[in-house]
């Protein structure tokens, strides 16, 4: 669902002319990377120039050159930033706890986390450019897709250990490739609302596809977690009874609903 390189030491491979030591310098580098992401998104990598990036960052071209010798070095730093964020995302996933959730909620948590990752301009542009212009990449390659598949396979294996190894690998491969294709279409769509609708369909697609293999009926130890029918939040409070059924109030969206 997300992608990362095999670089073992990301910070060491960034082609910075000068490593920023003070916080102000680090913030300037991040500002340059965000500006570069905007420029690459607007005009493409080939048409982009360091002068355009410096102007978008609101900094002098000389300040940019203090850190980066050319736009290739800037893009490589963007690759590294994206890789670091994906690795951080993976490290924060508590797989044993995640797989105990009902299937739809498990997928919802994963999809929302990935969507949050791509709200960051650098990660969004790096992901899109990997499919549009793979030749400009220096530290990310096809191995990152294999890492994503292995991550998803691990989740499926934990959720249903009875699945044959070849099957959970195949399921994971289909999930990663199909979700990446939808994410790419969503990120390239200029309409924010349609982009959101596309992203939301990943949840429906994956739930339907995975239900026969890792659905709730196959797990005897899945926790019964009540979710809001309107926003899928689990931050609920009991709110009396209606016709003999428990009512709940969602603390996030404020709507009420009856237990299904």
Image (spheres, rainbow, N blue to C red):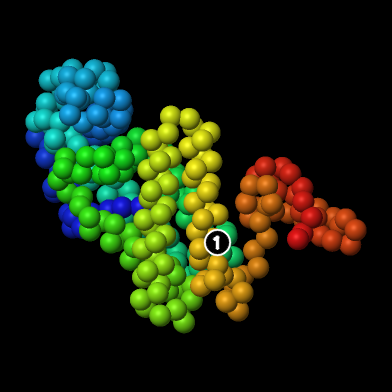
Quadrant where the C terminus lies? Answer: bottom right
Residue at horizontal 53%, vertical 41%? 197
Residue at horizontal 37%, vertical 78%? 165
- Most distant residue in the right direction: 243
**Spot occupied by residue 186 in the image (x, y as percentages of width and height):** 43, 40
**Spot occupied by residue 217 in the image (x, y as percentages of width and height):** 61, 74
In the picture provided, is 69 more to the left or to the right than 221?
Answer: left
In the picture provided, is 225 more to the left or to the right than 193?
Answer: right
Residue at horizontal 45%, vertical 64%? 94
**Spot occupied by residue 134 in the image (x, y as percentages of width and height):** 20, 44
Residue annotated with mark 1:
208
Numbered disc 1: secondary structure: helix
18 up-or-down from 204: above or below: above
Among the 4 quarters of the image, the one containing residue 129: top left
Residue 91 seen by the camera: no
Q: Nearer the viewer, residue 181 or 1?
A: 181
In the picture provided, is 241 more to the left or to the right than 81?
Answer: right
Quadrant where the N terminus lies? Answer: bottom left
How many badges with numbers are in the image? 1
In the picture provided, is 151 more to the left or to the right than 213?
Answer: left
192 up-or-down from 160: above or below: above
Q: Nearer the viewer, residue 173 or 148?
A: 173
Mark 1 neighbour density, 10 Å: few (under 14) some (14–19) many (20 or more): few
Residue 188 seen by the camera: yes
249 up-or-down from 171: above or below: above
Residue at horizontal 27%, vertical 20%? 56
Among the 4 quarters of the image, the one containing residue 126: top left
Q: Nearer the viewer, residue 110 or 59?
A: 110
**Spot occupied by residue 2 in the image (x, y as percentages of width and height):** 35, 52
């Amino acid at each position: 669902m997300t992608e990362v390189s095999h670089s073992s030491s990301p910070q060491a491979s960034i082609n910075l002319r000068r490593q920023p030591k003070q916080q102000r310098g680090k913030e300037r580098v991040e500002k340059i990377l965000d500006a570069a992401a905007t420029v690459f998104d607007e005009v493409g990598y080939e048409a982009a120039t360091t002068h355009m990036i410096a102007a978008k960052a609101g900094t002098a071209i000389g300040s940019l050159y203090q850190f980066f010798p050319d736009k290739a070095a800037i893009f490589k730093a963007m690759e590294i930033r994206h890789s670091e964020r994906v690795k951080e995302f993976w490290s924060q996933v508590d797989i044993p706890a995640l797989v105990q959730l009902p299937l739809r909620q498990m997928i919802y948590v994963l999809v929302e986390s990935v969507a949050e990752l791509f709200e960051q301009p650098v990660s969004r542009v790096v992901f899109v450019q990997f499919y549009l212009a793979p030749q400009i990449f220096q530290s990310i390659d096809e191995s990152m897709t294999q890492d994503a598949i292995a991550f998803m396979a691990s989740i499926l294996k934990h959720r249903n250990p009875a699945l044959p190894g070849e099957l959970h690998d195949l399921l994971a491969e289909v999930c990663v490739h199909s979700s990446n294709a939808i994410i790419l279409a969503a990120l390239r769509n200029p309409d924010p609302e349609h982009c959101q609708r596309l992203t939301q369909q990943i949840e429906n697609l994956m739930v339907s596809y995975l239900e026969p293999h890792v659905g709730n009926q196959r797990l005897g130890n899945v926790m019964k977690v009540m979710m809001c029918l309107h926003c899928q939040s689990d931050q609920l409070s009991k709110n009396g009874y209606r016709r003999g059924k428990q009512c709940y109030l969602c603390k996030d969206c404020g709507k009420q609903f009856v237990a299904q």
